[in-house]
Amino acid sequence: MEAAALGQLGPWGIVSVFFMLVFLGALIPRWTHKERMKDKEELIKKLQIALDKRDEQFDKLIEQNTIAIKALEELKLASRESRPVL
């Protein structure tokens, strides 16, 4: 809207425009914004904790797989040594 058109609305027209902006979501009250940002920060913290736990579990699984591979390689070597050659 131009400045001239805004002046033609009158006080109730201006109030109506601002009400519609808030109602349609173009303007967000500060308390709502802060509340949403607080919720997002809490969610980020929870997800970060879950991600750290997942990484910790992944590291444990990698270590266990390394141990299992070494054990199987030693079994394979021991079976070759104890088997008679034909």
Image: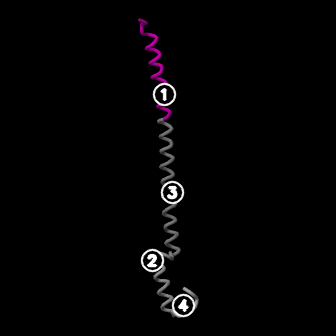
The amino acid pointed to by label 1 is Ile
Q: How crowded is mark 1: few (under 14 residues within 10 Å), some or many (20 or more)?
A: few
> Start and end of the magenta stretch?
62-86
Q: Position of residue 51 (x, y in %)?
A: 49, 48
Taking 56 as reference, is 67 above or below it? above
Q: How far apart are marks 4 and 3 (CA)?
A: 45 Å
Closer to the chain start, of discs 2 and 1, is 2
> Tag 2 or tag 4, which sits nearer the N-term?
4
Q: In this view, does 7 lie above or below 29?
A: below
Q: Which of marks 1 and 4 is in front?
A: 4
Is 77 within the magenta? yes
Dot 4: within a 10 Å radius of its alpha carbon, few (fewer than 14), some, or many (20 or more) residues?
few
Residue 27 location in percent, x, y?
51, 77
Query: Label 4 amino acid?
Result: Ala
Q: Which secondary structure, mark 3?
A: helix
Give the numbered dot on residue 5: 4
80 or 30: nearer the eye?
Answer: 80
Residue sitting at x 49%, y 29%: 66
**What residue is shown at x 47% (from left), y 26% (from top)?**
69
For the N terminus, the quadrant is bottom right
Give the CA distance from mark 2 to mark 3.
Answer: 28 Å
According to the picture, the residue beneath numbered tag 2 turns out to be 24
Mark 4 or 3, closer to the camera: 4
Circle on res. 67: 1
